[in-house]
Image (tube, helix red, strand yellow):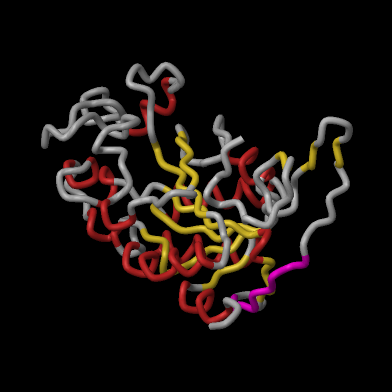
Amino acid sequence: MKRHPYLPDARPDGALGLGHQHYWVASPDEVDMAVAPPAPVRAHIAAAPQNLVLDLRRTAIVIIDLQNDFCTRDGWVDSLGADYSADRAPIAPLQTLLPALRTAGVPVIWVNWGNRPDLANMPPNQIHLYDNGGRGTGLGYPLPSGKGNVLEKDSWAAAIVDELAPVAGDFLVDKYRISGFWDTPLDSILKNLGIKSILFAGCNTDQCVLHTLTDANFLGYGCVMLEDCCATNSPAFCTEATIWNVKKCFGFVTGSQQVLAGLPGA
């Protein structure tokens, strides 16, 4: 089987599975399901409401919806007359953070809205959410700029912004709801990687980021919101309420600089 670029070179021949620690070792005569997990790689990170120690071998970063339709001129948000520039705030900190996390062996998972062209899996309530009068530029509609259809998979509109182009070894997941877990393989990928803790980034803070994070919390993951790597064009009170709720009920809040400072060797 071809080795995924994320996997370490030190795994034994016959290893089956993606994770550093969640795999079997098979030979013609035996399958070893009792592979001992490696020792944790600890990162001490300043956070609220408490500081954290994360195991980098069992941590991933999930980045949500940093796509042209939300973050780029001529995209969907821009066509609606909203401030797409507000959604670009995570780009610069992620340009610094992601290379460091990849070097530390932390999987990078992009969760992006990418609809089927026929919208066959989108029920009326989801279509109504973005075209509530039946006359707007809703999901799958042609963009006024002529650059494709709104959030359609494999189009310019749904593509990750150029400044954050994925690299070999990153994981890409299409989503079809505000939560990245609903009707997607995200949970299976995380479990197969042996992930226990998730760093969250992306847009919009109060919508797709928050609800993906809350679903992760309900599924038992440790959830950490990277405040400077999240953005929204909603009113400021939406971000304030999201941060308060994450710290109160759903996990922890920190920033990219705190993560960088906590990486081994920093």
181 shown above or below 136: below
Q: Look at 33% across and 56% down and name the residue there.
A: 164
Q: Which of 40 and 93 is in front in this view?
A: 40
Q: Which residue lies furthest to the left in this view?
A: 145
Q: Look at 58% across and 56% down and name the residue there.
A: 60
Percent across and percent down for residue 98 are 44, 64
- Over which residues does the magenta segment extend? 39-47
Percent across and percent down for residue 159 are 30, 41
Q: How many marks?
A: 0
Q: Look at 16% across and 35% down and name the residue there.
A: 147
Q: Which of 120 and 189 is in front in this view?
A: 189
Q: Look at 67% across and 53% down and name the residue there.
A: 195
Q: Quadrant of the N terminus?
A: top right
Percent across and percent down for residue 168 are 44, 49
Along the horizontal axis of the image, is 149 left or right of 225? Answer: left
Q: Quadrant of residue 240?
A: bottom left
Q: In which quarter of the image is residue 232?
A: bottom left
198 shown above or below 131: below
Along the horizontal axis of the image, is 135 left or right of 54? Answer: left
Q: Nearer the viewer, residue 263 or 211?
A: 263
18 shown above or below 107: above
Magenta segment includes 124: no
